[in-house]
Structures are given as structure tokens and as C-alpha cells.
Amino acid sequence: MKSSLKIIPLGGLGEIGKNITAIEYEDEIIVIDCGVSFPDDDMLGIDLVIPDINYLLENQDKVKGLFITHGHEDHIGSIPYILKQLNMDIYATRLTIGLIASKLEEHNISKESLIPVKEGDVIKFNKLSVEFIRATHSIADACSLAIFTPLGTIVHTGDFKIDYTPIDGRVMDLNRLSALGEEGVLLLMADSTNVERSGHSLSEKTIGETLNRILDGATGRVIVATFASNIHRMQQIVDASLKENRKICFSGRSMENVSKVAMELGYLHIPEEAVISVDELNNHDNNKITIITTGSQGEPMAGLSRIAYGNHRKIKLERDDLFIISASPIPGNDKMISKVINQLYKKGAEVIYEDLEDVHVSGHAYQEELKLIHSITKPKYFLPVHGEYRHLKHHADLAKKMGMKGENIFTMENGDVLEISEEGAKISGKIRTGVLYVDGIGVGDVGNIVLRDRRNLARDGMVIIVFAIDMENFYLASGPDVITRGFIYARENEDIINEIKEVSRQKIEECLLEQSTGWQVLKGSVRKSVEVLLFEKTKRKPSVFPIIMDV
Amino acid sequence: MKSSLKIIPLGGLGEIGKNITAIEYEDEIIVIDCGVSFPDDDMLGIDLVIPDINYLLENQDKVKGLFITHGHEDHIGSIPYILKQLNMDIYATRLTIGLIASKLEEHNISKESLIPVKEGDVIKFNKLSVEFIRATHSIADACSLAIFTPLGTIVHTGDFKIDYTPIDGRVMDLNRLSALGEEGVLLLMADSTNVERSGHSLSEKTIGETLNRILDGATGRVIVATFASNIHRMQQIVDASLKENRKICFSGRSMENVSKVAMELGYLHIPEEAVISVDELNNHDNNKITIITTGSQGEPMAGLSRIAYGNHRKIKLERDDLFIISASPIPGNDKMISKVINQLYKKGAEVIYEDLEDVHVSGHAYQEELKLIHSITKPKYFLPVHGEYRHLKHHADLAKKMGMKGENIFTMENGDVLEISEEGAKISGKIRTGVLYVDGIGVGDVGNIVLRDRRNLARDGMVIIVFAIDMENFYLASGPDVITRGFIYARENEDIINEIKEVSRQKIEECLLEQSTGWQVLKGSVRKSVEVLLFEKTKRKPSVFPIIMDV
């Protein structure tokens, strides 16, 4: 009898970002993707959120390799951090490898673990093997994976859409998926992001027509903000610009990086003389310039915002500039983007964005595309992946509507272990998963307590009460002094500062009279009475820190 | 020759919320609306944002009254705060007055300044007079205003849509607007919120059909989250529930408040026996219960979130509950709402929301409705209002497309003074406007410096270095002690705390050796060297506070 197969999502299931999944059979584990996510609003000061790979570390002898479906941040962003904990061979197609390599360089990590593959390649281990299958997505060189196991084949779509007219002409390999379906697919894991959208997504090519029309009418500079990773979008902007004899200037760190990698590897085609640097902009007429920049999500530190608010070092907004925001707001970013659009209009520029023109299409499959994949792969079991919980739920519903039995569908959360054996499939347990916060160069040294303190400080600021006590003779040697930050405008509110001092002094002297009171009690007593005073006077709850010096 | 007329938006122009406009002719000023807005993410700890009415205070002898178009927070929310600074007669229709009255009661403010009016009423002063004109919007009893001035008539639409089948049967008074157009409209001020949407908004009545169908199939409790102020929506939920013999329970403070006011004033019709309190829920079968609650924006402290996360005091989620979110995300809230939806699904409930069914329509006019208003009022000048700057800009474009001359259209910002005389109209100046932050009971005592401090504290926390110095003899009497909050998990990072002490001690001793160094220099020197140390070691920038005690 065969052993059982375990599928364990370590991150990214039922949430956005940090995709990482382990597939385990006996003494072999393969890992799929290794993404990062960006902090929620309440994760104050956090730069990045990476998955806790405790499970992989405990089983590191089993880990055979990391397989990357495509080069988006939520699939590759944690690699530099994870490699520091666990060295793995990394398999991916050429562009993806190029993007990972430039990340590793930034972190000064050796690139020797990177192994480029091409579609159709099969990486074989003793019991598991992995085949790369061409897919289409909003980044070039995306792949689905087939994982062959002693119990049957797993198809993992990766992030995908079905684009019959992709920019590079390389349509998703539906024939291969179909052949796998004929042979028998044990488990399908499929992208759920757009399951709430009916119909079929539009081809990336439709954007090109809109861009041609817009650029045809543009009389000044054209400044396009888009995702740095969307090389096909970049190519279409380039093509539309070249038609109008415009030079191309890439601006913004990630835009410069990615375009460089993509050009070197042959994924982005531009005649050398058509590319100009930001310093050369002044050598060309405005109507001969297209700038492709970062910041399509309204990020305050990225290119688009800097230009809008006049703090870009090299690019100053001009009144005949035409801005194109060729992107959709990622949930949570709509307000930031709207602010940038307002600012651009205030400065007199023209702005074209998704609400006005078809300047963006999604990279994720809609309902009819998902149905196609279910239909041709004919899986025995189904595990919806990629998307928030609501999307997984709706993807499960879609599979049911297509005739799958509810008990063969698994709507899971991170850490749930899906165990498949010859008897059947079930969620057989839960392993520890979680996240680590990256803040500056620290990984994991900011936890929930630190974040709670930041939130408290952020809400109503803080009040420090400092005083010196001669503990031998039980008298107040100095203070109390009061320092506030973020609480109230102290210069105009001296009364309240004086009241804090008064209340504190009273408490200190009461405690000193007793002579036996410990410092903790003294501190607690001062804190409590100041908190009560401040809430009564202001209905605020600043963090109150009494500090005692022993002299 | 006649004097000139001034139109001065004091808030709400080119942004969401806190609408307030002054219209001035000689010694008379009338004020339109007095709204509040909610803090942006970076306004840490702020509860509300209200307009700075400095201009009205400086001209308070001229102010004749405050005219309210409808009872939404962004039109009435600042009234309690503004009335404390400037007493004004307040004119509004009955429901609006009812909603304002309940606000004033909460703030213990006299209601004697409230003057209920009905549509068609004209309030006359010496030079200015104001007529209330029936409009349709996502709250009952909404009005447009005609302001008659010696120079001509101003039409202010207020927030509106054109609903030919409103729930109360009271269609917007297009005939009156048309008659005013025939007589000649000097200036049109019109709602721009939905100017980016083509076509015509759907009637509120369409929601009723969807609700009927959904409730017809519901087998357990139905829990609907919607805007408390949308009384027509409430009525439709009630009607669909009564058809299925369900009892109605209003839950959540604002939902209870508004439904009470609306029932008392006859805007919401429910047989008395059909309303049950939250304590009576257990007396009825689940399939005979509809709960109408707050929290449709995913607000963590409101009804829907509390039920979802299991911390509602009275309502526990059950597996056959059907939730309906009858609202659209206000920009910035999509992530919060999505979290609540995910949580409801995880708990096994069913959820219906805008992406899945037509359970919400907008209350603001789309392009074809706006064109209708422009067309029948035939204004000489046009001032787009209500909406972000991009919307004002597109509304101006729409007017131009309809044949208006660009020089007769004014896309303005808050504080701009539009001055109209017999010679023409122009932006003739700018007055001081701005906002005041409400935090707890304090109004205006948290300003930009306090907010900057909160942001700094929130980002990387703080490090306090405290030491006592005998300044007569220039020696370090005690310390330095180090206290951190929100910076790093201190217990696991003793090394860095010790390094902070070491660096500080060194600096202090260097300074003391010189004997002449002032405290500010000493503090600055300690702060600087600790900041450098911490950035080098952690790439973080906590707020560093050196505190010296003199003993």
C-alpha cells in the first residue's frame, strides 16, 4: 500500500500575498512559490510580511527544491529572507530567475541555487517530479505546474488567465493540461482571484489598441505608470510610443531594474537608440517622450506620486503632460491613487485611468476560464488557492456547480494539512504557520507586543513623568517633570501639564510616606492616577510612562 | 450698480466630506450645510475632522442662517461643534431636523435654533432668500436649494439622483427646477460624485425586487447591514421581511437612533408588533427574524464586524445565517469590508454583497442625470461641487461638452472666492479655510505637530534614555536607563539596550568633561549618537528622547 501525500499551504491561502505551499510524500518535500505580502494598516512601521517556514526547517532534510510559478512579489518576494534560513535549489523559467537573481544581488546572497528551466522541463526526484507548463498571466514566462506523485498527478495552475492573443504569441498550453486530464488528475489547485467575475477576461492585446489611440492624440509628454513586472504592458507602451517616434525613459528603481533584466533576457524588445535616461529628457521635445514609471498604486515614495507632488528629483510636471495609470487599485489602495489623480488634475495635467478608458486588464482568470480548466483537467479532488477566503469559497461553489462532489473539495486555511491516500482525501491535521514581520533589517524581532505598543502610541501619543527619588531617605529629589509627544499641543495647554505634575507629586509623596512601597507600586499608582485625570479632562488615553531615577 | 455676490466653499470642495459653503451679498451671509469628515489613515488617533469656520466667525454679524440640504453626516455632522462657536438658525426639512436634533441632544445643546421647513418654503432675508426644492437621494427628505439674490438665482442641487420611482413616491421637483431655468439661473452648483459614470443610476426600487427574491429563499435569520441613514433602504428590507412574516430587529446605536426618529416622524412604516428588540430574538424562530444592523463599511466596532468576530454582546452568529451587505465600500474601506466577508464565510454563514447581487444602488446622479439638470436649469455660470477634484474637473468637462464656455465654469478649491457682479464672474481671492481635528473632547488641540509626533512614534516606536546629573559638580548621578516601547522586543535584544546605554554614557561623560555644555547640547548629542547607532544596527528610526534630571 502506498504512503499518503500531503499538501500543506504555509501561506497565501485565503489572503493576499505570501504564497507558499509544501507538497510532501514520504521523505520528499517540494515547495511551490515563496512570496511576500505587504503590511496591513495596523502593522505600523512594518516593511514586509514573510511566511514562517518553521515546518520546512523542521523537515529540511526532506526539502528537494523550490519551484516558482512566476516572478510577482507575492510569489518570489520572500526568497532572500527564506534562503537565509534554508538553502534550497530554486527552479523557474528564465525571466523569473532573472528577477529573483536581481533580488539576491540586492541582498548579497549567492545565486548558485538558481536553476533556470523551460516549459516542458520535468525535474525528477525519487518519488516526486515537477513539470513546467506554459501559462499566461500579467507577467511574462508564467507557468502552471504538474506534480507527479506515486498517488497521481497534481495540477497547480499558478496565477493565470487564458489569453488567446498574448503579446508574445505564447498561448497557455491547454493541450498539455488536457492530456494530463485524459491521463487522470488527482488534485487541481487553481487560482481563485477573479472567481467573482463572470465571463472571460479581456486579452492584454486590447490595451494596445487603446494606447495607440491615446498616444496618437497626445501633444506633450506621455507618462505611464504601471506595474514594473508587467513586461507585456511595457512592450505595448513601447510599441505605441515608437509608432509616434517617441523615446522611452524608464524611471523608478523597480522599473529600471525589471526593464533591464527583461531587455537583457530578450523579453522586452526596444531598439537601443530609443531608450533614453532621465537625464536626457531635456534633449528631446515633449511630444517625443514617453516616460514609464512606478507608483501606479499611488505609493507616496514612487515615481508617479513624486512627480504629482513636485518632489521628483529629475522629472517636473508640465501642463501638457498626459498621465496614463495603466493598473487597477489593489484592495486598500484606492484612496491613495485617487489622491494622486486629484493632484495631477490640480496641476493642470491630463489623466487617463481605468474608470475612463480601457487602459488595464486583469491577469487572473474569470469564471468561464476557470470552468475551462476544471473541464479539461477533470480532477478527482479540488483545492482552490490564490485569493481571499471569500474567493476560495466561491471557487468551491463553482466546482460544485460543475458537478464535483462537495466532499472532494477542500476550502482550507494556512497550515491545514490535506492528506490524500488510496482511501481518499481529508484534512488530517494542522501545522504551525504564521508570519514574520520584517522591519528594517530585523526579521521577527517585532512581534505583536511591539505592534500593540506602536498602536497605543499612535492613537493618543504618550506622556512621560520622570522624577528622582532618594530611596535611602525616602524623599523626592527632583521632578516630577512631564514630557509629552503626540498627546496635545503642550505649549497651549500648560494647565493640563501642571495638573499632571500635581497629581503625580501627590501620589509620589503618599507612597513615600509609607516608606515600604516598592517602585512598581509607586509607578503603577502614578500611571493610574494620571490616566484617570487625562481621560476625564480630554477623553484620550495616551500611553503614560512614569520613570523613577534612584539617586 | 449692484454689489457683487460671493460664493465661498469653506469645506468639502474637491474632497469627500465636511461640506460647507457661504453665500454672501453685502451684509448677508447664508451658509449651506455643515458636514464632518472622517480622518485619513495618517491622522492617527483623530476621531473627526470639522471645518475651520474662521471666516464666518469674523463675519458673524452677517450670518443669517444655516440651510441643510439633507441629513447625511458629511452635511450635518459638524453642527454640534460649529454651534458651540457660532449660534445660527438652522433650516431643514423634518427628517433632517429630527436627525440634527438627536445629535444636539447627545451633545447637550439646545435645539431652539432648529427650524423645520417643507419643500416649497421660501426663507426671506433682506437681500437673500432661500427656497427648498424636493430632491431624491439615498436619504429621505433631501432638498435642492434655490438662493435668490439681487444678481440672480443660484441653484444648489445638494446631493441628488433622479429616481422616477422613489420609495415614497416623491419624485424630484424637476418642474420647479425647469421653471427656475426658464426665469434664468445665474449659477448652478451641482453634485459631481458620479460624473465618471455613464448612463443613469438605477432606481432605489430595483433593490426591493432583489431583496424579495433573496428573502423568499432564506431559511434562517437574515442579517442586513446598511447605512443607518438610508431610510428607504430600511423600508424595503422591512417590506420584504414582512412578506415572509419576519420580525424586524434594529441593532447598533445609529441604526436604533435613526429608525426611531424615522418612525416617529412617519418616514419609516412598520406595524408596531413587527419590531422586536435584540433581547427578544430568542423568542422567535430564526426564519422569522430579520436584523438590520450597522457596519456595512466593515467598521471594526460596528454591528456587522462584532457579529462576524463573535464579540457582539447579544447576537451570536449561527451557521444558517444569511448576511446581506446592502452598501458600497466608501473609498478606503474595501479591505475592511472584505475582511468581514471572509470572516463570515469562515464561520459558515452565507453572504450576499454588491459583487454578487444588486443589493445596492448609488444615491448620486450619473452623467445623463447631470446633463438633465444642466439642460433644464440653463445656468449662466457653473460651479461643480461635491466630489473629489477629479470629479469637479470631469463635471466641468461635461458642462463644456454641453456647450458652456470654459470661462463661465469654475473648478475651485476650498477658500476660493467666486465673485459674481454685473460685469461677470471671477475667482477674486482666497480666504483662510482649513480643518480642525476632534480628538476625544478636544477640538483643535491636536495639530500637525502632534500628528507628526504620533506618526513618528507609530513607525518605529521610541527609546527613552534617562539619567540624573549633578550639575553643580558635573557628574552623572544616576543612569543612563533605557526604556523602549514599540521599537524592538527588548527582552530578546538586551545587547542593543546595553549598546544604547554605553553610547549614551560615553556622550554624557564627554559633555560633562567640558563643564560648560548646556543641557540642550547634551541632549542633542546623546540623541544623535543613539539615532546613528540604531539606524546602523536595525535600519529603524525610533523617536529618541534623552531626559535629564538635575539632582
Image (tube, coloured by chain):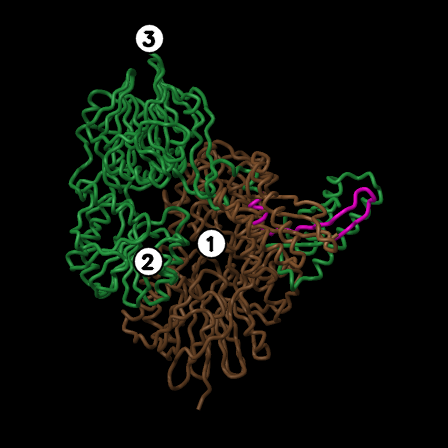
Chain colours: A green, B brown
Q: Secondary structure at mark 2?
A: loop
Query: Which segment did they paint magenta?
Result: A453-479
Residue B232 has which mark?
1
Q: Nearer the viewer, residue A31 or A481?
A: A481
Dot 3 alpha-carbon crowd within 10 angstroms: few under 14, some 14 to 19, many 20 or more:
few
The chain under label 1 reads: B
Task: Find the distance from the CA under tag 1 to the CA under tag 3.
Answer: 65 Å
Q: Are marks 2 and 1 on the same chain?
A: yes
Q: Position of residue B397 (x, y in %)?
A: 31, 67
Label 1 amino acid? His
Determine which residue is flagged by label 3: A1
Callout in the foreground (2, 1):
2
Q: Position of residue A433 (x, y in %)?
A: 46, 29
The chain under label 2 reads: B
Q: Secondary structure at mark 3?
A: loop
| Residue at image coords 82%, 45% | A474
Taking the view exactly as shown, the residue that stands out farthest to the front is: B513
Dot 1 alpha-carbon crowd within 10 angstroms: few under 14, some 14 to 19, many 20 or more:
many
Which image quadrant for residue B367? bottom left
Determine which residue is flagged by label 2: B197
Taking the view exactly as shown, the residue that stands out farthest to the bottom is: B1
Q: Give the mark, 2 or 1, whose residue is nearer the N terminus.
A: 2
Residue A246 has which mark?
none
Q: Which quadrant is home to the N terminus of chain A?
A: top left
Task: Find the distance from the CA under tag 3 to the CA under tag 2.
Answer: 62 Å
Dot 2 alpha-carbon crowd within 10 angstroms: few under 14, some 14 to 19, many 20 or more:
some
Label 3 amino acid? Met
| Residue at image coords 69%, 56% | A537
| Residue at image coords 56%, 74% | B56
The chain under label 3 reads: A
Asked if residue B225 shows in the view, the reply is no
